[in-house]
């Protein structure tokens, strides 16, 4: 089994822009500003960083240098048409960054763009609805067998560079396609909707896909957040789910040079996301119960949470990529459906370890 490791880094910048090509009266045609978040993720060659284990910090420094010309500036001075997609591509081309970097740009908490490994720009929009549901097929006593509710979030990605030629797709087009579904889903009981008698996260994601794809042909994937820490993704063929946890751990880096702050004992509140892919259970309507994921992972969680990572016997060092690989290798023994682990030591900065070819769409 071939394993891929991507190093991730993120930075923020504040900037103004004006997209004059938009119709008169469109808010973005006026001069306005955003607090942007840029994230880069890429495979790095051996010995790329100044020291082994310093990849995340060095990549973050290089990303910050790449966006420095944009920070507190008018973006039109650097990019003639500073849409999210054009800005992301501009950043990805900067010489400070490694080649073949994938770039995510968030212009607001509810919209942005992912530029994938093939160079395609997938615009995304986040929508929220309040709804009730019950899962009628769960075992007796399962908490989801009681009527309950969530503040659901749905993230829709659409490929601006789809082969269909739909190059004019915009965030407004995604919003327009979503609007009728928002009316059906918001302040509703999902079980009452045709086709959602068993509204698991997986079946809700494919239910949304089936209704959006005909009116939004460039739709790339649908991500459903059932809660802030778990959800499902559907791309028209495959289902994926994830479970997110936080770890509070101490560490020091053995590979850091003398005098480095990272060689000193310190700590992080890590964000850990376990991604799993499996065929849909036709009876239950899910790939795996989120509760089962948490239960099966719990012994590994207890080895990491509120623990000194540098005392784990078979962990060579405590850089984020090494810890993510350790989690991946140990968790797959209990969760064979696991094909990807994301571990972030700070917001957007960390590592992704995955089976080669696993879908690299990131919940946002």
Image: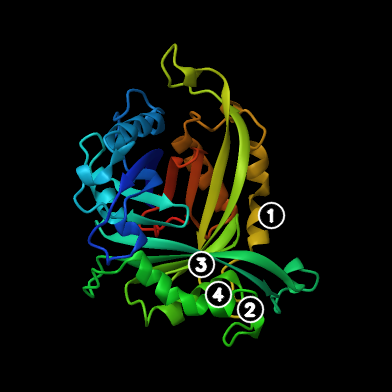
Q: Quadrant of residue 10?
A: top left
**Nearer the N terminus, badge 1 or badge 3?**
3
Element under disc 1: helix
Q: Are marks 1 and 2 in contact (CB under 8 Å)?
A: no
Quick one: label 3, few (<14), some, or many (20+) residues within 10 Å? some
SS for callout 2: helix
Under circle 4, the secondary element is helix
- Report the residue marked by disc 3: 278
Q: Which residue is mark 4?
A: 204
| Residue 354 in sight here | yes
Secondary structure category for the residue under label 3? loop
Q: Which residue is mark 1?
A: 295
Question: CB of mark 1 within 8 Å of CB of mark 4?
Answer: no
Along the polypeptide, which appears first: circle 3 or circle 4?
4
Would you say residue 237 is visible in this rendering? no
Earlier residue among tags 1 and 2: 2
- Of mark 1 and mark 4, the one earlier in the sequence is 4
Q: Measure how far apart labels 1 and 4 are at the Cα level.
A: 24 Å
Q: Could you give the CA–CA distance between mark 3 and mark 4, rounded to whole angstroms?
A: 16 Å
> Whole-percent x and y of residue 191?
65, 81
Please state the total of marks drawn on the protein image: 4
Q: Which residue in the protein does label 2 denote?
A: 190
Q: Nearer the viewer, mark 1 or mark 2?
A: 2
- Establish if 302 lies above or below 159: above
């Amino acid at each position: 089994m071939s394993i891929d490791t991507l190093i991730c880094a993120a930075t923020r910048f504040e900037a103004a822009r004006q997209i004059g090509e938009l119709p008169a009266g469109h808010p973005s045609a006026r001069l306005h500003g955003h607090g942007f978040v840029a994230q880069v993720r890429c495979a790095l060659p051996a010995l790329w960083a100044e020291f082994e284990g310093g990849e995340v910090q060095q990549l973050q420094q290089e990303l910050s240098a790449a966006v420095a010309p944009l920070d507190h500036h008018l973006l039109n001075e650097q990019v003639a048409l500073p849409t999210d997609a054009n800005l992301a591509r501009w950043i990805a081309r900067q010489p400070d960054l490694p080649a073949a970097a994938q770039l995510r740009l968030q212009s607001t908490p509810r919209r942005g763009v992912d530029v994938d490994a093939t160079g395609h720009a997938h615009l995304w929009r986040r929508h929220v609805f309040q709804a009730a549901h019950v899962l009628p097929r769960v075992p007796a006593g399962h908490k989801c067998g009681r009527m309950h509710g969530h503040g659901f979030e749905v993230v829709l990605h659409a490929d601006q560079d789809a082969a269909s030629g739909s190059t004019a797709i915009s965030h407004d087009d995604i919003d327009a396609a979503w609007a009728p579904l928002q009316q059906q889903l918001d302040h509703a009981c999902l079980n009452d909707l045709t086709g959602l008698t068993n509204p698991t996260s997986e079946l809700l994601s494919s239910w949304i896909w089936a209704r959006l794809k005909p009116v939004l042909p460039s739709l790339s994937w649908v991500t459903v957040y059932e809660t802030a820490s778990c959800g499902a993704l559907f791309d028209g063929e495959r289902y994926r789910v994830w479970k997110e946890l936080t770890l509070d751990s101490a560490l020091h880096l053995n590979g850091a040079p003398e005098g480095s702050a990272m060689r000193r004992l310190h700590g992080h509140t890590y964000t850990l996301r376990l991604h799993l892919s499996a065929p849909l259970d036709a009876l239950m309507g899910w790939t795996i119960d989120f509760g089962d994921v948490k239960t099966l992972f719990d012994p590994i969680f207890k080895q990491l949470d509120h623990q000194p990572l540098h005392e784990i016997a078979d962990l060579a060092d405590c850089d984020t990529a090494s810890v993510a690989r350790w989690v991946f290798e140990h968790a797959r023994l209990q969760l064979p459906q696991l094909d990807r682990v994301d571990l972030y030591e700070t917001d957007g900065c960390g590592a992704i370890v995955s089976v080669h070819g696993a879908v690299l769409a990131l919940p946002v």
